C-alpha cells in the first residue's frame, strides 16, 4: 500500500485511519484487492461507533453493485435501516430532486417527479421526426449529408446519445447553437433547434419527467442554486462512501464535489477497470482527486491496496500485461499487486479453433469436464463476452447441450417478447378489427406461447375450415377463414383436437371483448382480462419451479408479462384516461427495452453468461472469455461521430480550439484504451482459472488481446482439439458407434472364418449401453428398441382395409406406377406446400368452369375481379404473374374458337364420376373429375383436360398418356351416367386432348390421344389399385442420378436407394 496523506502502513492501520479520519480519501487498488470489503467494513465500524444510518450514504455505479453492497452491509451492520443507505448515483439524485420539490424548490413541477424511460424518449423523438417529415412542424436545418439518414432508427439512436450528452453537460439549446457556430458544425446548430423543440414538448406534457442522463446534473444544479438546501444536505451526510469511482462521469464528480469536498468522503477505485466508458466514465479524473476534493483545512489523501485476494499470480500477471498498455488514470496507484506467502494456484490458458462451432463445443466440453471430473459446481464458472448478442447465442448453444445457464434479462423491447407480443396483437385486433394489416397475424398467434399449435396442426386446421366452408357453399380461402374465426367463433366448433390452440385464443379474445364492452376498460384491466383467460399463470409458474430450459423459459416469460403490466400501470398513472389503443401504440412504437427492477435469483446449478459490463464487481473461480477476434474485441469503430456528441463534450471541457486535435488516430487510440479497460475487467473476474479463446481462419483473425494474455501463444496454428462433449446423449452415440462398427467388422470376418468373435471393445460398449438402458430413468437412445431400423413396424395392414374398396384417381395412376413410395408419401399428406403456380392453376380452372364460353375480354374482366384471391403483392412480380394469367385465359378463349371450328361443342365441365372397375380381386373404384366433356359431330363424347403448367409430353407419349387413357376408360365404364347433361351420350369416347394454356406458345398447345381400341388403360387402373392397396411401397428411380425432382429421387431422406434414406443399421 502506498499513500500521499497519512502514515498508515497496512490494511488494519488503513481501516483505523479511514474510520477515525474525516478527510476526503481515495483508496485505489487493482481488482480483487479488497476495496468493496474495506468499504463495507468502514461503514460497519462507523455505524457501530454511533453514526446515524440516515447520515450515511453509499454510492455505487450500478444497481447490481448497489444490491451486493446493500446485502453485505445489512448482514454485517446488525441494525435496521429505515431508508436506503446504498444507492446508485441516479437513485440518490432522483431522491434529491424529489425532496427539493417537496420543499418548493421546483415550482414548475406539479406532479411527483419520475424518470423518462429510454423507450419513452425514443418514441417522443420518433414522433417529432415524423412530424418534420410530414411538414407538421418546421424541420431543423440538417446538413445535406445527413438528410437521407433523418428518420431512421440509427439516426434516432445518434440523437438520443447526443441529447444524453447535452443533458449530462447541462447545456441549453442556445449553448449548443453557439458552439456549433464557433466550430462551424452545422449539425450542432440543427440539433440545438431540435433539442429546443424536444424540451418544449417535454415541458408541456411531462414537466415531471426527468431525463436519466441529465438527472445528476439537475441535482447538482439544484444544490448549487440553493445554498441552504446544500448546507442541510451536507450537515445530514456525515459519511459518504463511493464504490468504483473510476466509473464516475464529469457530472457525478460535480455532484460529489458538492457533497464531499473537504468532508468525510471515502472513495474506492480500480483505475484501470472501466466498463461504463460508453456512458461517460472518466477514469482520468482520478488524477485530479486531491485537487478537486481538498480544502486548505482538510487535504485529501490517496491510498493504495496492494495485496491480491482474488487473482492468483498467473492471472495477475496477465492482467498487468493488459493494463500496462493503458494510460495511467491515478498516477501509478492501483497497479501494484503482491501475494501472501502461500497464494492460491491459478492458471491462464489460450486456445485457437478453426471455426466458431469448434469454439462453442470446446466451451461446453470444458464446462462439463470441470463439473464431472473436477467436481467444480457450475455456479463457480462464468463466460464473459463483449456483447449481448454473444450472450444470447452462447446461452442458446449451451442449453442445447444440456448445460443450464443464467443470463441477465434479455435486452429486447417489450413488443418483441414472446409472451408479450400476442397480448398486444389481441388488444390491437379487439380495439380496431379493421386495422389488421398483417395477413399472418392469426398464424403467429397460433404458434405463440398462448396458441401452442404446431405448423402441422395449423395446416390441418386450415384444411378443416376450408372443407367446412365449402360444404356450406362458401368460397373463402383458408387464410380468410382463419382470420374470420375471431369474429365468427362458430367456425371453430367441432374441429377436433387440432383446434385447441384456436379455442384458447378465441376464449381470450371473447373475454377481452367483454371487458372492453363495459366502457370502463383501462390498459391494465384489458391486459388482466387476457392474461386471466389464457390460463397460463399456473402452468408457467409450475414450469418455472422446475429445472431445465422449459423452466427458464417460463421464468423469463413470467418476468416479461410482469413487465408489460408494470408498463400499463405506469402508462395509466402518467396519462389518466388514455385508451387501450393508445397504450398498444405506445408499446409498439418503442424500439428500446424497458428497464426492469425485477430481481432474478441465479441457481447454484447454472453457468453464468454475461457481458463484461454486467460482470463488474463480481468474481468466479473459473472464467471463460471467448470471441477474442480482431474487429470484435477490440472493436475500434468510431462511436457518436454522426452528430459529434463526443466532440461536443470536448469543446465544452477544453474549448472549441481543442477540436483540432481530434485526429482519427487519436480517436482510435482512445477507443482502444477503452476496449483494453473493459477487457481487463473481464479477465480480472477470475480467481483460479482464466481461459481465453478465439478463432483463427481465413475469415477471422485472433485479437491482439490474445497475444497480450499469452505472448508465447502461436496465433497461426496449433488448433486445440475438441473431444466429444461429455454428455449422456454423446456418450450413447459413441457407445453405439463403437459397438456397431466392431460388430459389423466381426460379422464380415466371421463370413471368412466362423471362429472369429466380437472384440472386447464392442462387448464393453454393449454392456454399458445395457446399464444405461436399465437406469431409472433410462437414458434416452440407449435401448435398442428405440433405435431407428430396429423398432418394429407400427402396422403391417394394407393402407386400404380389406372390407373397403380401393379408390383410384386418374391423376395418380401415373404417379403410383412411377414410384409407389412417392405416391404413398403424398397421399399421407407429405407433399410440398402449395406454391403460387398451383394456386394460379386452381384460379384458372375455376374461371374456366364458371365461364366456359367467354370471350377474351370477358375473361380478363373476371380475372381482375378475382385476382385479389391470390393475395399477390402489387409490385413488378405481381404484375408479371397477372400478365401470365391473362395469357392463359386468352389461350383458353382461342381454344373455344378452335373447338367449334372442329365441329365440337361443350356439354359438361368439372364432371365428377365414381365408377366400379370390374376385375377378379378386391373391389376397385375409379373416382375423379373431368375438366370438360365435348361432343363431336357424330355425338360421341370427347375428353379435354386443361393444363396450366409449361411441361408437355411429346406427341408420341400423348398416345399412351395414363391420365387421358384412364379418363376414356372411365367413360366406357359409365362415368357419363351420373349427370343429365351427359347420360344420353354413348359410352364410346371419340378421343381425348391435353390443352396446355401455360406454354410459351402464342396459341394453346394440344396433345391428342385417339379413342381406345383395347383395355390397356383399364389394366393400368387395376395395376395401380394393386400397388395402392398394398402394405409395402417400393421406390423406383435411377439412384445414380441423385436427388431432386428433375434429376432423380424426390424423397431422398426416406428413400432406401439413396444414401440419405438408408437406415442407420444398414451398411
Image: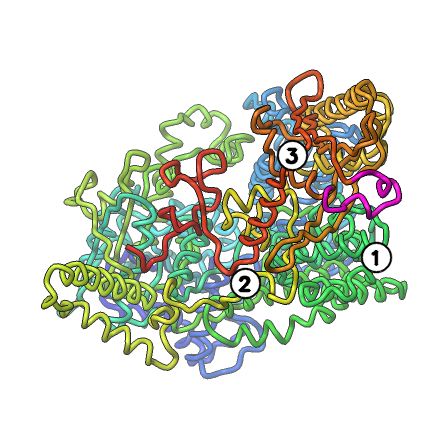
Image quadrant where one finds the C terminus:
bottom left
Q: Which residue sits at x=34%, y=55%?
A: 270
Say if 14 sits above or below 158 in the image: below
Find residue 539 and report its horizontal and vertical position in percent.
61, 74
Q: With 214 as the anchor, is 1048 left or right in this view?
A: left
Q: Which residue sits at x=17%, y=44%?
A: 718
Disc 1 or 2, which lies upstream in sequence? 1
Q: Which residue sits at x=83%, y=57%?
A: 487
Locate residue 789: give its quadrant. Answer: bottom left
Could you classify mark 1 by the number of other residues whose Cα lies within 10 Å: few (under 14), some (14-19), or many (20 or more)?
A: few
Which is closer to the viewer, label 1 or label 2?
Answer: 2
User: Magenta span: helix, strand or loop, mainly?
Assistant: loop
Q: Does residue 448 show up?
A: no
How much space separates mark 1 and mark 2, taking CA atoms?
A: 43 Å
* Tag 3 near tag 2, CB within 8 Å: no
What residue is shown with label 2? 798
* Residue 418 magenta: no
Mark linked to residue 487 = 1
How much space separates mark 3 and mark 2, taking CA atoms?
A: 34 Å
Residue numbers of the magenta segment: 972-986
Find residue 1031 and report its horizontal and vertical position in percent.
51, 61
Say if 583 sits above or below 954 in the image: below
* Tag 3 near tag 1, CB within 8 Å: no
Find residue 857 and report its horizontal and vertical position in percent.
85, 21
Q: With 87 as the anchor, is 663 left or right in this view?
A: left
Q: Looking at this view, is 348 or 192 the one in front? A: 348
Could you classify mark 2 by the number of other residues whose Cα lies within 10 Å: few (under 14), some (14-19), or many (20 or more)?
A: few
Say if 282 sits above or below 736 in the image: above
Amino acid at each position: 500500500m502506498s499513500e500521499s496523506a497519512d502514515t498508515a502502513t497496512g490494511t488494519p492501520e488503513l481501516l483505523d485511519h479511514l474510520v477515525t479520519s474525516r478527510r476526503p480519501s481515495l483508496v485505489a487498488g487493482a481488482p480483487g484487492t479488497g476495496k468493496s470489503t474495506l468499504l463495507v467494513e468502514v461503514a460497519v465500524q462507523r455505524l457501530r461507533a454511533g453514526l446515524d444510518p440516515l447520515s450515511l450514504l453509499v454510492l455505487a455505479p450500478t444497481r447490481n453493485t448497489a444490491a451486493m453492497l446493500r446485502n453485505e452491509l445489512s448482514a454485517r451492520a446488525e441494525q435496521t435501516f429505515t431508508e436506503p443507505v446504498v444507492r446508485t448515483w441516479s437513485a440518490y439524485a432522483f431522491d434529491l430532486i424529489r425532496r427539493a420539490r417537496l420543499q418548493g424548490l421546483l415550482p414548475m413541477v406539479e406532479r411527483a417527479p419520475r424518470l423518462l424511460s429510454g423507450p419513452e424518449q425514443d418514441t417522443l423523438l420518433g414522433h417529432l421526426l415524423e412530424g418534420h417529415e410530414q411538414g407538421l412542424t418546421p424541420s431543423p436545418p440538417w446538413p445535406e449529408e445527413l438528410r437521407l439518414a433523418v428518420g431512421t432508427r440509427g439516426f434516432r439512436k445518434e440523437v438520443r446519445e447526443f441529447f444524453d450528452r447535452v443533458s449530462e453537460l447541462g447545456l441549453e439549446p442556445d449553448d449548443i447553437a453557439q458552439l456549433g457556430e464557433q466550430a462551424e458544425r452545422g449539425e450542432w446548430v440543427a440539433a440545438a433547434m431540435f433539442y429546443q423543440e424536444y424540451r418544449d414538448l417535454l415541458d408541456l406534457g411531462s414537466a415531471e419527467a426527468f431525463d436519466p442522463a441529465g438527472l445528476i446534473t439537475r441535482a447538482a444544479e439544484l444544490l448549487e442554486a440553493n445554498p441552504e438546501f446544500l448546507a442541510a444536505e451536507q450537515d445530514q451526510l456525515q459519511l459518504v462512501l463511493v464504490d468504483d469511482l473510476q466509473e464516475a462521469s464529469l457530472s457525478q464528480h460535480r455532484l460529489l464535489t458538492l457533497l464531499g469536498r473537504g468532508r468525510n468522503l471515502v472513495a474506492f477505485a480500480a483505475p484501470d477497470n472501466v466498463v461504463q466508458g460508453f456512458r461517460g466514465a472518466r477514469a482520468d479524473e482520478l488524477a485530479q482527486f486531491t485537487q478537486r476534493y481538498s480544502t486548505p483545512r482538510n487535504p485529501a489523501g490517496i491510498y493504495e491496496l496492494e495485496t491480491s485476494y482474488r487473482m492468483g499470480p498467473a492471472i495477475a500477471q496477465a492482467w498487468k500485461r493488459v493494463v500496462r498498455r493503458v494510460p495511467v488514470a491515478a498516477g501509478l496507484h492501483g497497479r501494484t499487486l503482491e501475494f501472501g506467502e502461500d497464494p492460491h494456484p491459478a492458471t491462464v490458458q489460450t486456445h485457437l479453433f478453426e471455426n466458431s462451432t469448434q469454439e462453442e463445443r470446446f466451451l461446453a466440453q470444458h464446462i462439463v469436464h470441470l463439473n464431472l471430473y473436477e467436481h467444480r459446481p457450475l455456479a463457480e464458472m462464468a463466460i464473459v463476452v463483449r456483447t449481448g448478442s454473444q450472450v444470447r447465442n452462447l446461452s442458446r448453444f449451451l442449453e442445447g447441450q444440456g448445460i443450464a445457464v443464467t443470463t441477465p434479462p434479455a435486452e429486447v423491447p417489450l413488443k418483441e417478447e414472446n409472451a408479450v407480443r400476442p397480448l398486444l396483437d389481441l388488444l390491437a385486433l379487439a380495439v380496431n378489427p379493421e386495422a389488421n394489416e398483417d395477413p399472418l397475424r392469426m398464424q403467429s398467434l397460433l404458434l405463440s406461447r398462448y396458441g401452442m399449435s404446431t405448423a402441422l396442426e395449423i395446416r390441418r386446421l386450415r384444411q378443416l375450415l376450408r372443407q367446412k366452408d365449402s360444404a356450406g357453399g362458401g368460397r373463402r380461402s383458408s387464410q380468410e377463414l382463419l382470420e374470420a374465426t375471431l369474429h365468427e367463433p362458430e367456425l371453430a366448433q367441432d374441429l377436433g383436437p387440432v383446434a385447441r390452440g384456436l379455442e384458447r385464443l378465441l376464449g381470450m379474445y371473447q373475454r377481452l371483448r367483454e371487458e372492453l364492452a363495459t366502457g370502463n376498460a383501462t390498459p391494465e384491466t384489458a391486459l388482466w382480462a387476457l392474461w386471466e383467460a389464457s390460463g397460463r399463470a399456473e402452468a408457467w409458474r409450475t414450469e418455472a419451479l422446475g429445472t431445465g430450459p422449459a423452466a427458464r423459459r417460463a421464468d423469463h416469460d413470467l418476468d416479461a408479462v410482469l413487465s408489460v403490466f408494470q408498463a400499463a400501470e405506469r402508462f395509466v398513472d402518467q396519462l389518466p384516461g388514455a385508451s387501450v389503443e393508445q397504450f398498444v401504440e405506445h408499446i409498439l412504437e418503442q424500439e428500446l427495452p424497458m428497464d426492469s427492477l425485477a430481481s432474478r435469483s441465479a441457481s447454484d446449478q447454472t453457468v453464468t453468461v454475461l457481458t463484461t459490463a454486467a460482470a463488474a464487481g463480481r468474481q468466479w473461480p473459473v472464467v471463460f472469455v471467448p470471441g477474442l477476434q480482431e474487429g470484435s474485441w477490440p472493436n475500434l469503430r468510431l462511436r457518436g461521430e454522426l452528430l459529434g456528441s463526443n466532440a461536443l463534450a470536448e469543446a465544452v471541457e477544453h474549448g472549441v480550439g481543442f477540436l483540432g486535435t481530434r485526429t482519427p488516430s487519436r480517436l482510435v487510440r482512445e477507443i482502444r484504451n477503452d476496449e483494453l479497460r473493459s477487457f481487463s475487467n473481464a479477465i480480472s473476474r477470475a480467481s483460479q482459472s482464466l481461459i481465453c479463446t478465439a478463432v483463427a481462419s481465413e475469415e477471422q483473425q485472433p485479437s491482439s488481446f490474445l497475444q497480450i494474455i499469452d505472448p508465447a501463444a502461436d496465433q497461426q496454428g496449433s488448433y486445440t482439439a475438441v473431444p466429444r462433449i461429455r454428455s449422456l446423449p454423446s456418450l450413447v452415440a459413441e457407445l453405439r458407434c463403437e459397438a456397431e462398427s466392431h460388430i459389423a467388422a466381426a460379422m464380415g470376418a466371421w463370413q471368412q472364418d466362423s471362429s472369429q468373435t466380437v472384440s472386447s471393445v464392442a462387448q464393453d460398449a454393449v454392456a454399458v449401453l445395457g446399464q444405461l438402458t436399465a437406469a431409472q430413468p433410462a437414458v434416452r437412445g440407449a435401448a435398442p428398441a428405440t433405435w431407428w431400423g430396429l423398432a418394429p413396424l407400427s402396422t403391417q395392414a394394407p393402407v386400404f382395409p380389406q372390407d373397403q374398396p380401393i379408390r383410384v384417381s386418374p391423376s395418380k395412376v401415373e404417379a403410383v406406377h412411377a414410384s409407389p413410395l412417392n405416391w404413398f408419401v403424398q397421399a399421407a399428406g407429405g407433399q410440398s406446400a402449395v406454391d403460387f403456380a398451383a394456386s394460379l392453376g386452381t384460379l384458372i380452372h375455376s374461371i374456366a368452369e364458371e365461364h366456359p364460353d367467354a370471350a377474351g375480354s370477358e375473361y380478363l374482366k373476371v380475372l381482375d375481379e378475382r385476382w385479389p384471391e391470390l393475395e399477390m403483392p402489387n409490385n413488378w412480380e405481381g404484375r408479371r404473374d397477372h400478365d401470365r394469367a391473362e395469357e392463359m385465359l386468352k389461350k383458353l378463349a382461342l381454344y373455344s374458337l378452335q373447338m367449334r371450328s372442329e365441329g365440337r361443342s361443350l356439354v359438361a365441365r368439372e364432371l365428377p364420376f365414381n365408377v366400379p372397375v370390374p376385375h377378379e380381386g378386391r373391389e376397385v373404384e375409379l373416382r375423379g373429375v373431368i375438366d370438360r366433356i365435348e361432343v363431336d359431330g357424330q355425338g360421341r363424347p370427347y375428353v379435354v383436360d386443361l393444363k396450366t403448367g409449361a411441361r408437355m409430353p411429346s406427341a408420341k407419349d400423348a398416345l399412351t398418356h395414363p391420365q387421358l387413357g384412364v379418363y376414356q376408360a372411365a367413360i366406357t365404364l359409365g362415368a357419363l351416367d351420373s349427370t343429365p347433361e351427359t347420360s344420353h351420350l354413348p359410352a364410346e369416347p371419340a378421343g381425348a386432348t391435353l390443352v396446355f394454356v401455360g406454354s410459351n406458345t402464342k396459341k394453346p398447345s394440344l396433345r391428342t390421344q385417339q379413342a381406345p381400341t383395347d383395355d390397356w388403360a383399364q389394366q393400368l387402373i387395376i395395376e395401380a389399385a394393386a400397388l395402392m392397396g398394398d402394405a409395402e411401397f417400393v421406390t423406383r428411380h435411377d439412384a445414380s442420378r441423385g436427388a431432386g425432382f428433375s434429376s432423380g429421387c424426390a424423397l431422398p431422406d426416406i428413400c432406401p436407394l439413396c444414401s440419405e434414406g438408408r437406415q442407420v443399421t444398414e451398411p
